[in-house]
Amino acid sequence: MDVASEMSEFLEQVEAALATSLVDDRKAAGDRDDILREASRHLCLGGGKRARPTLVRLFAGAVEAPGEGLVDIACAAEMIHAASLLHDDVVDGGMFRRSKPTVNARWGNVVAVLGGDLLLTTAFGKLGKLDPHLTPAAIELVAEMTRAAVVEVESREDLSLTLPQIRYIHEGKTGSLFGWCGVAAAQRAGRPEVGRRFDAFGRHLGVAFQIADDIRDITGTDPGKPQYADLLARSPSVPIILAVSKDQDLRRRLRDAWAFASMSPERTAQLGEEILALGVVEEALAMMDAEIAAAIDALGSFAEKPEGVELIRWAHMLRDGIRELLGTRA
């Protein structure tokens, strides 16, 4: 069976395991359905790219980790990711995700926060039963994701934010979990030293993913949200910080616009076009390419394994996909 076929079968197993993990086992006793598990299912089983389970499987194959327990690790990674989304939607006041109402929009903030907590404890429980050595790293991972999320919130409207600071947020919120997928796979193979290579790959790739999101936002090539959402949210992104570092007058006008309670669509579009006119998209693309190159370099000899080749192909798909979207943008 080739890598693609194995991956398809693995992701089907992950999907089934997620569904089973989020069933309310109290219903057999006649109790009403647990609203927290219902809310967790609403997000966790509601689609998504399953990037993290994919990484678990590819890392595990590259290091020849035993198949036993990989589905549980993949489920834990997906649950940690989903928990972060539940919490993010509360912080951001998000109303839609994956073309559906968010949990906080449907059930309220309390259910969203506690549903995220339930997902985290479920993930830790799976890991603890499988291998107690996996849990401490997962707990530290969640701490890192949390610290990055706080920095992101504190950075709203802050146009003095630097590119290294944005990278810290991107790595903490996304790259750290990508990297943990490799650390966990290497641990299962009994080769924790390899985990450092996989962690570096995941962190660089995660930063590249976030830069790609920043690019899609400013260019209006993200089908899941309106153009200039970062501007409207007063959230400094890579293109925004690149632009205001080039044009101090734009920095002043954007700061003044963010000082108002709301921005008109016309004003937002005007500022967005000014940012685009400064050539920041190409600079952001170059930053994304550098992260991808660093990720591939981190693989070392594992780049020659079939799974390593697939990891590299996956990274190149991110780069090529963004460039294709920009080439077809009206």
Image (cartoon, rainbow, N blue to C red):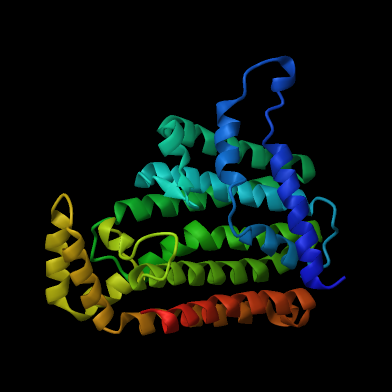
The residue lying toward the viewer, choosing from 23 and 146, is 23
Q: Residue at x 23, y 66 (%)?
A: 160
Q: Is residue 242 left or right of residue 55?
A: left
Measured along the vertical axis of the image, is residue 192 above or below residue 325?
Answer: above
The residue lying toward the viewer, choosing from 181 and 330, is 330
Quarter where residue 239 is shown: bottom left
Q: Is residue 256 left or right of residue 304?
A: left
Position of residue 107 measured from the top left corner of the image (x, y, whole percent): 45, 32
Name the quadrant of the N terminus: bottom right
The reply to whether residue 316 is visible in this rendering is yes
Name the quadrant of the C terminus: bottom left
The residue lying toward the viewer, choosing from 186 and 326, is 326
Position of residue 202 measured from the top left corner of the image (x, y, whole percent): 60, 67
Position of residue 74 measured from the top left corner of the image (x, y, whole percent): 70, 53
Q: Residue at x 67, y 36 (%)?
A: 22
Measured along the vertical axis of the image, is residue 222 above or below residue 105?
Answer: below
Position of residue 110 measured from the top left corner of the image (x, y, whole percent): 44, 30
Quarter where residue 244 is shown: bottom left
- Residue furthest toward the top? 30
Q: Residue at x 37, y 44 (%)?
A: 91
